[in-house]
Image: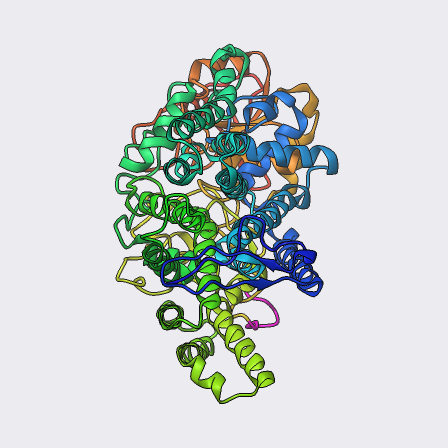
């Protein structure tokens, strides 16, 4: 059996001398002295944790440039137009929105308004969100198992490769993770004293998580609501109406923006990107909703199962790229979940230790199952939402087990967890054989020694003097922490040491074989692997992001050249502007042409697909119409609308190329992009600017197309 160490106000003020502890059946009540020295050490540890996380998240940050240029362009638009910021428009002239709710863009756009549009103003907000998430997770776990458990949880969050990746990148996942951790903290505070205020605040955080990434923010609701209904120290009916009040807070904090979009005249706002009907509910429930579960996503690129939905099944989290990004401590978290629930099985309903375990375990299980079984578009970096519950469960298991190390069951539990974690790390490392090969013998050797030392700790202690016993316990605890953190920490440092661009970033290490448990891998443009199968869009008019290639200094200490850029890879070749998933290097001649007399036009250019448009928009600083939105498959604008814009002289250039008619493999989307391309070709003359085919839409239409 295990006992919880600490109450809701752990540690007590130094003058109190001791902090009380919950006692579980069969466990030893352990009073913990708290001194001024303990408080000082805790503050030093917290300072080092937050400073280290901040350094990890901002180190070499500017090397990633615009990172995901799709969202960077939208942040640029928001910095130029309040209306574009409100709706999450891709361009400042409000042709179409991004295919997500806009909360993460609000943060970036405000930063860009204050500090100017540049890589740092776009990316630093995510780094700060990461530091805040680490701090809040520390506070949440500390309330139940004390400062060492809180510090361990924060360290695991900061040092998990996919978390390091996303807190250095401008996708919505960084803000989503922060808001969900904040909701967990508020729920824990509500559980302490059946507080309606804190529970309503938790609902508000979840509502804003919806505004960051739609329905994914709601995946924690079953766990949080169930835990409160089970464990809150108040009457049944009061628990019911409190959960109802929290649900209302979710609806209000998420629904105000949805209601605003619905009542705003459609012709006075941008088209809702990702939808086929210009309806926000089409985006919420379709493309970004149940379509992700079933694979029925109208307008997506690729069929079902597509290239980004391969591998769905019970073992998805343990396979290939996804396993190396997030699952290093997933077995340990599951062991801790089962062990702690077993230890508390006969405890009172209101036992707070079990409530915390259920909260984090419910978050992990529900979200993990959805990620594992969803048939629609899925990217491995989504798994950053699993890192907080993994970190919390591992930290709680470690802290509670170590506090009760006088019990054989606790020592066996810790020893088994360390052994399993070391073995699993070795399995994952075997699928990246050229990546820091010294780590495998290190984790296996230290893991074996630490496991045996913990199991036989009483016998070893008897053979030691008081000072030697203290050193023995400290060395054993540090060795156990090294087994848990060494490999993901090296992966996080290596991830931070390289630049990341494109729509689908990945962290270190990268599995380079058939997958951890036999999952297939797919090879994308330029040789990049993407979850399993062949990409349907091997063409494209773009080229890889600048900076690709080997470092002039050769292989670096963490197993990869630090000079390269990691992302979706992008189609290769010079002379284009990007592609479906990446943004090409801006051509100076084309940039100059777009900037010439730009104030005379509503859009300096139009082109198919948001990533094609993003490079033009970020380089020129002027609004660029992304025909068809992200996938080029949205019916925005229609041919008639485009013709009307041209007739009014509102668009300067149309930028063509092999993607102008749309990306191959689109399922059920609009053909507007192809219709517009055909009309432009038939009625305007083309020319080459910087090797890119453009059409000047302000010239007199002709009956044929010429090129120069």
Q: Quadrant of the N terminus?
A: bottom left
- Mostly what secondary structure, the magenta segment? loop
- Regarding residue 622, the answer to whether it shows in the image is no
Point out residue 439 in the picture as x, y percentages from the top left corner: 46, 75
Which residue appears at 26% of the width and 39% of the height?
304
Res 687 → quadrant:
top right
Q: Which residue is at the front of the view, 254 or 402?
A: 402
**Residue 554 magenta:** yes
Point out residue 73 in the picture as x, y percentages from the top left corner: 59, 35
Q: Is residue 305 above or below residue 552?
A: above
Which residue appears at 58% of the width and 33% of the height?
105
- Regarding residue 375, the answer to whether it shows in the image is yes
Which residue appears at 46% of the width and 24% of the height?
245
Q: Which residue is at the front of the view, 210 or 361?
A: 361
- Highlighted range, magenta: 549-557
Query: In the rendered view, does 632 fall on the left or right side of 172?
Result: left
Res 219 → quadrant:
top left
Query: In the rendered view, does 662 fall on the left or right side of 479?
Result: left
Q: Which residue is at the front of the view, 391 or 302?
A: 391
Q: Quadrant of the C terminus?
A: top right
Q: Which residue is at the front of the view, 321 or 587?
A: 321
**Residue 310 magenta:** no
Point out residue 410 in the picture as x, y percentages from the top left corner: 39, 68
Point out residue 527 in the picture as x, y percentages from the top left corner: 40, 58
Query: In the rendered view, does 170 fall on the left or right side of 272?
Result: right
Total labels: the figure holds: 0
Q: Residue furthest bottom?
A: 463
Q: Is residue 669 above or below residue 702?
A: below
Q: How is the image coloured?
A: rainbow
Q: Is residue 502 above or below residue 197?
A: below
């Amino acid at each position: 059996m295990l006992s919880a160490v600490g109450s809701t106000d752990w540690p007590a003020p130094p003058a109190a001398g001791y902090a009380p502890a919950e006692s579980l059946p069969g466990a030893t009540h352990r009073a913990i002295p708290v001194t001024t020295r303990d408080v000082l050490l805790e503050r030093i540890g917290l300072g080092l944790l937050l400073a280290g996380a901040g350094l990890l998240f901002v180190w070499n940050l500017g090397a990633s440039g615009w990172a995901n240029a799709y969202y960077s362009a939208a942040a640029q638009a928001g910095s130029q137009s309040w209306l574009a910021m409100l709706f999450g428009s891709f361009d400042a002239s409000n042709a179409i929105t991004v295919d997500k709710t806009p909360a993460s863009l609000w943060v970036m756009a405000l930063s860009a308004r204050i500090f100017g549009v540049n890589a740092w103003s776009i990316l630093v907000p995510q780094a700060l969100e990461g530091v805040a998430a680490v701090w809040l997770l520390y506070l949440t776990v500390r309330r139940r198992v004390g400062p060492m458990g809180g510090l361990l949880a924060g360290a695991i969050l900061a040092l998990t490769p996919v978390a390091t990746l996303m807190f250095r990148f401008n996708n919505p996942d960084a803000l989503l993770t922060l808001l969900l951790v904040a909701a967990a903290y508020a729920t824990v505070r509500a559980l302490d004293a059946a507080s309606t205020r804190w529970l309503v605040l938790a609902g508000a955080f979840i509502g804003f998580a919806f505004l960051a990434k739609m329905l994914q923010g709601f995946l924690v609701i079953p766990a949080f609501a169930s835990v409160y209904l089970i464990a809150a120290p108040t009457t049944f009916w009061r628990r019911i109406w409190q959960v109802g009040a929290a649900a209302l807070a979710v609806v209000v904090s998420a629904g105000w923006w949805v209601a605003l979009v619905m009542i705003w005249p459609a012709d006075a706002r941008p088209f809702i990107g990702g939808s086929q009907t210009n309806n926000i509910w089409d985006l919420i429930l379709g493309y970004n909703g149940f379509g992700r579960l079933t694979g029925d996503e109208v307008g997506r690129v690729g069929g079902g199962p597509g290239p980004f939905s391969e591998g769905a099944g019970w073992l998805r989290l343990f396979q290939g790229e996804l396993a190396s990004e997030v699952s290093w401590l997933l077995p340990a978290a599951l062991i801790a979940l089962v062990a702690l629930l077993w230890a508390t099985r006969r405890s009172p309903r209101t036992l707070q230790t079990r409530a915390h375990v259920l909260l984090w375990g419910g978050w992990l299980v529900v979200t993990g199952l959805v990620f594992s079984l969803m048939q629609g578009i899925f990217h491995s970096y989504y798994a950053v939402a699993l890192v907080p519950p993994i970190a919390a469960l591992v930290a709680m298991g470690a802290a509670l087990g170590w506090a009760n190390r006088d019990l054989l069951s606790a020592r066996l539990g810790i020893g088994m967890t360390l052994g399993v974690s070391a073995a699993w790390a070795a399995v994952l490392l075997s699928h990246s054989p050229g990546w820091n090969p010294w780590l495998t013998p290190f984790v296996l050797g230290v893991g074996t020694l630490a496991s045996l030392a913990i199991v036989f700790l009483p016998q070893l202690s008897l053979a030691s003097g008081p000072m030697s016993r203290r050193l023995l316990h400290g060395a054993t605890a540090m060795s156990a922490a090294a087994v848990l953190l060494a490999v993901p920490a090296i992966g996080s440092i290596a991830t931070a040491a390289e630049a990341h661009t494109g729509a689908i970033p990945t962290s270190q290490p990268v599995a380079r074989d058939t997958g951890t448990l036999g999952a297939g891998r797919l090879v994308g443009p330029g040789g990049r692997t993407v979850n399993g199968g062949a990409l349907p869009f091997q063409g494209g008019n773009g080229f890889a992001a600048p900076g690709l290639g080997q470092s002039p200094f050769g292989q670096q200490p963490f197993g990869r050249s630090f000079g390269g850029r990691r992302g979706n890879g992008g189609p290769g070749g010079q002379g284009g502007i990007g592609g479906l998933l990446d943004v090409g290097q801006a051509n100076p001649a084309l940039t100059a042409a777009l900037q010439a007399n730009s104030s005379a036009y509503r859009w300096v250019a139009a082109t198919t697909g948001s990533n094609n448009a993003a490079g033009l928009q970020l380089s020129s600083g002027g609004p660029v119409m992304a025909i068809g939105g992200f996938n080029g498959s949205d019916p925005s604008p229609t041919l008639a609308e485009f013709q009307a814009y041209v007739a009014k002289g509102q668009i300067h250039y149309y930028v063509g190329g092999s993607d102008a008619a749309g990306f191959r493999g689109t399922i059920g989307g609009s053909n507007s992009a192809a219709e517009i391309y055909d009309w432009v070709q038939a009625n305007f003359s083309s020319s080459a600017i910087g090797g890119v085919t453009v059409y000047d839409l302000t010239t007199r239409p002709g009956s044929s197309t010429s090129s120069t």
